Amino acid sequence: MKTKISVNQTDNPHSHEESDLVARTRALESLLLEKRLVSTDAIEKLIASYENDIGPMLGAKVVARAWIDQEFKKRLLKNATAACRELGIGGMEGENMVVVENTPTVHNVVICTLCSCYPWPVLGLPPNWYKSPQYRSKMVIQPRKALSEDFHLEIGSEKEIKVWDSSAEIRYLVLPERPERTEHMTEAQLTSIVTRESMIGVGQLNYKKKIRNGKRKR
Amino acid sequence: MNGVHDLGGMHGFGPVKIEEKEPTFHSEWEGIVFALCHAKPAWLYNTDEFRHCIENMNPADYLAARYYERWLFTAEYYLLKKGVITRKEYDARTRLFKRNPRVTLPRVYDSKRVMEALRLIHEGSSTRREVPRESKFKVGDRVLARNINPIGHTRLPQYVRGKSGTIVRVHGIFVLPDTNAHDKGENPEHVYSVRFDSKDIWGQSAEDNETLHVDLWESYLQKP
């Protein structure tokens, strides 16, 4: 297949200086504004939406609801996109979501080896480490070691690790296991213990940590 | 293409660096690049063209670049290529902002564009296509990921090529990136979640009790 984009590889290396990146960005923005191809208010809306409104707190709501409502959980595992919509959650980079469930015998972890695919409507924009060559290279070849060494998450070899490489347009969210002895907690309290990392599969809930710290203090 | 972006299984990058309390954008320009890439007219480029352009960065630049720098590179590439801006006006404008960072930008208000942005954020733009077509494979089928090495765009990672796995989910029909990135049409195909045993991919280097699940288009697969 003839590729249309080949000229870039012979270009001189670009400057990675912050001041050059700022100047290039402002130059593009000003030209596009002058040509009326973009608007200031749309740019501000896009930035503010992902800085303030769309983030892991939405995924945490989905997880907490699945923990307290078995029927919702069934729908979520069957069609995550539709189930999230019930909670008013959905949109760009989450048009086709799949939720994978952690169990006593299975631990799930999500990755995109080819770029940076990530379920924006439930987790917001991905952190730098998720998009880094470090994470993308090692999490498919030795995930158990990477989880232990880089994320301090120990998964015993009796538990299967399922790695989900987001190589197409499906976006994955991990449903962590509900901790024991949380029957007394309200939905809002449950939401507060769900961490971004637990929904990617690289970290724990905030709950265990609290208990452990508490024990250490005593 | 067998590019530097296809990182699965590579060694030597060192530990994952996790930043505590990481902001959504690390600098103002990152947020603006992010927004421009979504506020831009839809005809400028599609997602597959966008990804392929990033893959075509000079490999050393790709690795050295900040994440949104790759987006900036791609926005520049298509704006220049499609003649929306000229190299001359862009270079002159970049020099102006480099010399004088305090120059203020025009402010343009357009409620229609805000509505379009909100629709994109909250509804997205799916590449799923409702085509009445039977899937060639079903859950439980053994399949072989084809050993193809196209010079153009593909979403078949190198680490699964030539390896056998099992279909675990049929996702539906989606636009084929391999043609959509090259102005050769959407050619929608079934996409499958294929489970590979880690041992079948990495041999003796694999850890025990691990499986890799990769989403693959139908034409990436054949019967073993």
Image: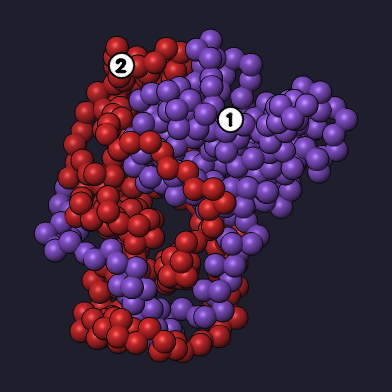
Chain colours: A purple, B red
Residue A111 seen anywhere in this rendered image of the structure = yes
- Report helix, strand or loop for mark 2: helix
Q: From what the image shows, is residue A75 above or below residue B185?
A: above
In the image, taking residue A211 as reference, residue B83 lies left or right, namely: left
Work out which quarter of the rendered image holds the C terminus of chain A and state it.
top right
Q: Which residue is drawn at 55% across and 63% down?
A: B120
Q: From what the image shows, is residue A13 above or below residue A135?
A: below
Viewer-proximal residue among A4 and B160: B160
Chain letter belonging to callout 1:
A
Viewer-proximal residue among B154 and B99: B99
Viewer-proximal residue among B147 and A58: A58
Q: From what the image shows, is residue B89 above or below residue A216?
A: below
Q: Quadrant of residue A193?
A: top right
Q: In which quarter of the image is residue B53?
A: bottom left
Q: Which amino acid does label 1 sit on?
A: Val
Labels 2, 1: front one? 2
Q: In which quarter of the image is residue B224?
A: top left
Residue B191 seen anywhere in this rendered image of the structure = no
Q: Name the residue under label 1.
A: A100
Q: Which amino acid does label 2 sit on?
A: Ser
Q: Name the residue under label 2.
A: B205
Q: Which residue is drawn at 36% across and 39% down?
A: A134
Q: Residue at x 28, y 45 (%)?
A: B5
